[in-house]
Image: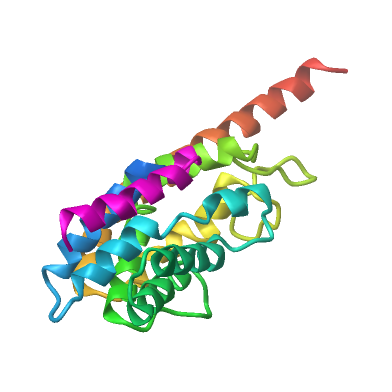
Amino acid sequence: MNKQTYLLLENYMLSCMEDSAHDKEHVYRVLYQALEIARTEKDVDYDILIAACLLHDIGRKEQFDNPSVCHAAVGSEKAYQFLIEHEFAAAYAEQVKQCIRTHRYRKTDLPQSLEAKILFDADKLDVTGALGIARTLIYKGIVSEPLYSVAPDGTVQDGENDTAPSFFQEYKYKLEKLYSRFYTARATEIGRERQRAAVNFYDSLYSEVKSAYLGGRDELDRLID
């Protein structure tokens, strides 16, 4: 990929980024991680990979405005149209589109090409470890969701069986399960290196919140007639 093409794609990406949890630095981290993973794989098409990484989250605004919209689906269509309008080959635009469409964490519509799998892994690595915890907390703040839920009996929910959105629910539903879902060996290795930081944070936060409710509630009951 030449510099002119890179700047064209980068500038389009920059024009689409508004979400502070999925900002341009997230895109750059995904791109850099993808290139690190690609070094350990054979026959990677870097033109497809770089374009897909740069454009993978350009549908975020549409999803933020309407949560029923899938940013991967919208973003893949936007990327395809942009590439076609700028006279990229249809076959190339289609491959970039497929990478973007399948990068989201889902049980269906899984990535098929090597480039799509690398993008998926690089994007998921940005939700692992301490970095993933920090990004999740930022996003929960943006959408005004709490750290945790409290059951009717006053106990703090750990997120395991929660249906209401919260940080603990997101951790149990998604973050905790990421580490066994990578496609590439290098991403699996990086994920394992980061996993302990995420586990320690969740365990510490849950322990601190739970102990505050246990001790404080008992003391309040003692003081109030």
Q: Quadrant of the C terminus?
A: top right
Q: Residue at x 24, y 58 (%)?
A: 5
Q: Is residue 139 left or right of residue 215?
A: left
The image position of residue 53, as x and y in percent, is: 32, 60
- Helix, strand or loop: magenta stretch: helix
The image position of residue 3, as x and y in percent, is: 17, 53
Q: Is residue 190 above or below residue 156?
A: below
Q: Residue at x 36, y 72 (%)?
A: 96
Q: Residue at x 45, y 69 (%)?
A: 80
Q: Specify whether residue 131 is in view.
A: no
The image position of residue 164, as x and y in percent, is: 70, 52
Residues 90 and 164: in front is: 90
Q: Quadrant of the N terminus?
A: bottom left
* Magenta residues (range): 1-22
Q: Is residue 6 above or below residue 212?
A: below
Outermost residue, right side: 225
Residues 86 and 150: in front is: 86
Residue 9 in the magenta stretch? The answer is: yes
Q: Is residue 132 left or right of residue 164?
A: left
Q: Quadrant of residue 38?
A: bottom left
Q: Specify whether residue 192 is in view.
A: yes
